[in-house]
Amino acid sequence: MSRRRAAFPPQLLTGVHLCLAFLLEVAMVAAFCVWGFKFAAPWNYVLGIGVPAAVVVLWSLFLAPRATHRIPLPVIPPVSLLIFLLAAVALSVAELVAPAIVLAVIGAGNAGLGLYLQSVLKVRS
């Protein structure tokens, strides 16, 4: 008699997903800062501070767990992946190709993990 066990408990994967999501959000803001400060003065200050600030405000309004106007749950991983890929493109334009690839790959993996967790937790509830 063998018991079937899950490879990882959903609680552990959820914790990993949320921790990775937070680190990716910080990296995304830093990527937009780096991209903005690559421009010539005075645009470097406008873009280096303004674009990350706008991204943070939009993220907190629509994508954050306690957002006031949160978009529907199934749409969050693809939208967050799109923003992470834009940050990766910004890093690539700033001539930081290796960090751009790392951000894109980890962002895609985290979005996939988010979709997987949504399907697993929906089945269990």
Image (cartoon, rainbow, N blue to C red):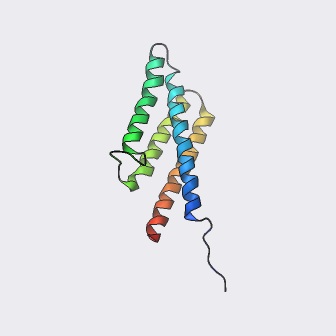
* Residue at left offset 46%, top offset 24%: 49
Which residue is situated farthest in the left direction here? 69
Q: Relative to residue 87, is residue 7 drawn left or right? A: right
Expressed as whole percent of the image width and height from the top left, the position of residue 80 reads: 45, 45
Q: Relative to residue 62, is residue 2 drawn left or right? A: right
Which residue is situated farthest in the top direction here? 41
Q: Relative to residue 110, is residue 75 drawn left or right? A: left
In the depicted structure, whether residue 111 falls above or below residue 61: below
Who is closer to the viewer here, 60 or 48?
A: 60
* Residue at left offset 47%, top offset 18%: 45
Expressed as whole percent of the image width and height from the top left, the position of residue 44 reads: 48, 18
In the depicted structure, whether residue 3 falls above or below residue 92: below
Who is closer to the viewer here, 29 or 82?
A: 29
Where, quadrant-wise, is the N terminus in this rendering? bottom right
How many marks overall? 0
In the depicted structure, whether residue 35 falls above or below residue 62: above
Expressed as whole percent of the image width and height from the top left, the position of residue 14 reads: 54, 57
* Residue at left offset 38%, top offset 45%: 67
Where, quadrant-wise, is the C terminus in this rendering? bottom left
